[in-house]
Amino acid sequence: MERTLTIFKPDSVAAGHAGQMLGQIEAAGFRLRGLKRLWLSPAQAESFYQVHRERPFFGGLVKFMTEGPVIVAALEAEQAVTRLRELMGATDPAKAAVGTLRKQFATNIERNAIHGSDSPENARIEIAFFFAGCELL
């Protein structure tokens, strides 16, 4: 079994879509191991997305991720990282496959509804960013 992290971004939470999205994720066979609702500070968002610090979209990403509450979830499944990324769809919802979460719920490439870890190594780092070991079942 493998773990991955997902974040229902502020646009999803504000629109009331996080529950539907989580339901689809669970229906796809993922087990929920941790769940939190929180509001990221600018420092937290900058730290979490530090890998993108030099990219031109970094400032906008930090602003977006701090505009409202998010819901973070630690998930577990066989090949969790790959399977969640397939379920999420392409970063640009205009290019996402029909039935994917981003095709259904994202507005555009910047307001793309959901984050998912991009590798098992990053999943471990990202899960530890949001969850203490005793918070994961």
Image (tube, rainbow, N blue to C red):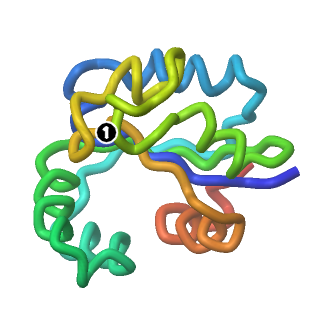
Q: Is residue 26 above or below residue 64?
A: above
Q: Is residue 58 left or right of residue 127?
A: left
Q: Residues within 10 Å of mark 1 (few under 14, many from 20)?
A: many
Residue receiving disc 1:
112
Q: Residue at x 45, y 30 (%)?
A: 96
Q: Is residue 41 above or below residue 18?
A: below
Q: Residue at x 51, y 35 (%)?
A: 89
Q: Residue furthest front?
A: 95
Residue 38, given in percent of the width and then of the height, sits at 31, 49
Q: Secondary structure at mark 1?
A: loop
Q: Between residues 37 and 105, which one lies in front from this camera angle?
A: 105
Residue 135, given in percent of the width and then of the height, sits at 62, 55
Q: Between residues 48 and 93, which one lies in front from this camera angle?
A: 93
Q: Is residue 79 above or below residue 87?
A: below
Residue 16, given in percent of the width and then of the height, sits at 29, 19
Q: Residue at x 38, y 79 (%)?
A: 51
Q: Amino acid at mark 1?
A: Asn
Quadrant of the rendered image containing residue 47: bottom left
Residue 95, given in percent of the width and then of the height, sits at 40, 33
Q: Residue furthest bottom?
A: 54
Q: Between residues 9 and 37, which one lies in front from this camera angle?
A: 9
